[in-house]
Amino acid sequence: MACFERASPALKQILLQLYRADKPVAVEHHLHEFGSLQYHIQSYVSEAHHVYLSISTPILSTGSSILSGFPHYTIETVKGICHEVVQIVEPAKTGYQLTLKLDFSKIPRKKDAVKIITDISSVQAVILSSQLRELLKNVNDQEISQGTYKPIKLVYPPNEPFYVVKQPAKLTVVFPIRFKEHSDIVIAKAFFQELVDVGNSGACARAPPCYWSPIPPPELRGESMKDLSTNGGFVLFEIYARHIEGKKLDKTVWNLLNFNALVKYHVKCTKGFVQRRMRSRLQSLVEALQQHTTGMEEEDHNIAKVKGHRRMKKLIKFTRGAILMKRWNLRNRIKRFRSRIRIRGFQRRWLKLPSFTSVMSYHKLEKF
């Protein structure tokens, strides 16, 4: 399941347990999270206050270029989390891209300790956010001054590209949406339409404007057809200066990086909700049928005890179905179970056969 918080909850819990331990313990944990993200936490009894944290995460890449390690500005950003506690180990542990040595003895024994460990647990968010911020800074300002806006193709998670178009007054982010199953496309399109309606309403006036289009937007002219071939359309966000001021920058960047994961999470939850409702309605119908069967057995037993005229027995048998339908309200339950889904804007029209008269006329022949 995707985690949309900057700090990893599992990593934070393990680090807090090691920090609050009364005596040194030897611990080794392997964590696997959404998006091919892996953590390795290890501590030794010989090193009482030290914990080694290794991380392996998909790197934000531009186009088809794939980086083998973290850039220099990303390393400096990680050091800035808490330079007294965090120290980068060279070389990194085998199979991981970065290894950090955490010195818990330099963390104050106060409320600030939880905040520092939370910041350390958000190291993956710091890595990705720093890469996107640096890519946006390195856009050729000369092209912008001349009015040519060349899209920047970014890939995160792997095989899911999105585009950033930097313009003088705003920043446009375009997400091509792709799904494998047709049912996912239907749910996602309904989600996008509602997102556009709510995002452009007065209640969300401070949020970035959102748009959805089934065809590529004009900002992506000149891109390859392979990247623009989608079955879920394109979602656009317009980022203005007020959305990246101060502390809003990290939040905006993190939300953009996790938009694809959010869409998949919504589709998965919606399908699960629909399946639960279908099972619930099926269970209610089964219970109604079981009650109906039990009632019929009781009525048969009562009819067998009735003594009198044969017509009276037939009358009781005839009214039994109506009594059961009324007693357990079977008619309404069956109608509700078989009710069709109402589609807005669709009106049912019945075909009416025209009435016509025969051209031929007949006369009755009299007998001779």
Image: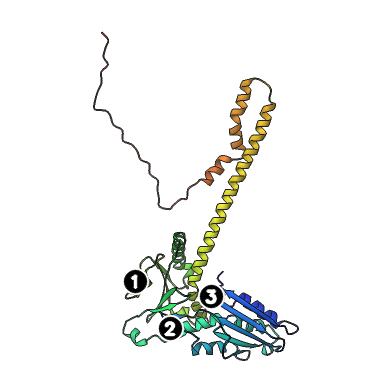
Q: Amino acid at mark 2?
A: Leu
Label 3 SS: loop
Amino acid identity at mark 1: Met
| Tag 1 secondary structure | helix
* Residue 287 lies in quadrant: top right
Q: Point out residue 90 in the picture as x, y percentages from the top left corner.
A: 57, 91
Residue 110: give x, y in percent of width and height.
Answer: 70, 84
In this view, the residue in front, 211 or 275, is 275
Quadrant location, the N terminus: bottom right
Dot 1: within a 10 Å radius of its alpha carbon, few (fewer than 14), some, or many (20 or more) residues? few
Residue 225's mark?
1
355 in relation to 339, above or below: above
Q: Give the class, few, some or many, for how many residues have Cα within 10 Å of label 3's Cα (few <14, many ≥20).
A: few
Real-space Cα distance between discs 1 and 2?
A: 24 Å
- Please indicate, yes or no, whether residue 6 appears anywhere in the rendered image: no
Does dot 2 land on a helix, a strand or a loop?
helix
For the residues labelled 1 and 2, say whether their Cβ atoms are less than 8 Å apart: no
* The C terminus: image quadrant: top left
Seen in the image, is 82 located left or right of residue 350?
A: right
Q: Nearer the viewer, mark 1 or mark 2?
A: 1
* Kind of residue sitting beneath label 3: Ser
Using the image, tell me which numbered label, if any, was put on residue 136.
2
Q: Provide the residue designation for mark 3.
A: 36
